[in-house]
Amino acid sequence: MTTRHPIAPHEVELVAVRAQGAGGQNVNKVSSAIHLRFDIRASSLPEVVKMRLLCLNDRRISREGVVVIKSQEYRTQEQNRAAALARLDELVDSVSVTRKARVSTRPTRASKLRRLDGKAHRGEVKVARRRVVE
């Protein structure tokens, strides 16, 4: 998948750390998990995308404007690095899509008549439920 705004590799800080959780002896010896840090304000992204990222209510974005992603789902460092970068690309792509402006439309004459006929019919039903007074 091609991203709309590619991120330069020098703007991303990747650190290998030990993974958490069960995994036997291997998890205690190998640093296969990846911590990705990406400073939004210091990046080369367009200002509009930066502002949208900073306005996101996402727990991965700190108050200082740094995206922190931890990837530890795979056994190898390379797979975790690729997964973390893919998540960062997905996050940036989610805010780079601009919504199409809504074009306001007017109801047709027939739809207005149908609505009024429905209202009149409901009124007749309610009148028919009333107690008969002689």
Image (cartoon, rainbow, N blue to C red):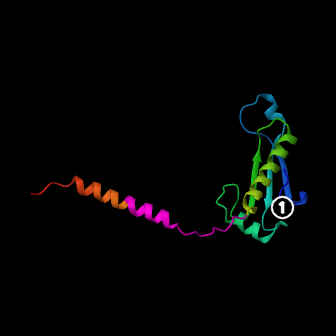
Q: In this view, does 24 lie above or below 55?
A: above
**Which quadrant of the rendered structure holds the C terminus?**
bottom left
From the viewer's side, name the closer residue of 4 and 114.
114
From the viewer's side, name the closer residue of 121 and 102.
121
User: What's the amino acid at mark 1?
Assistant: His
Q: Position of residue 96 (x, y in %)?
A: 76, 62
The furthest residue to the top: 24
Q: Position of residue 33 (x, y in %)?
A: 80, 42
Question: Residue placed at 49% from the left, 63% from the top?
Answer: 110
Q: In this view, does 126 lie to the left or right of 29?
A: left
Q: In this view, does 50 lie to the left or right of 56?
A: right
Residue 104: quarter of image: bottom right
From the viewer's side, name the closer residue of 113 and 79.
113
From the viewer's side, name the closer residue of 111 and 84.
111
Question: Residue placed at 86% from the left, 60% from the top?
Answer: 11
Q: Name the residue under label 1.
A: 5
Q: Is residue 111 above or below residue 14?
A: below
Question: In this picture, which residue range is highlighted in magenta?
Answer: 98-118
Residue 29: quarter of image: top right
Q: In this view, does 35 lie above or below 101?
A: above
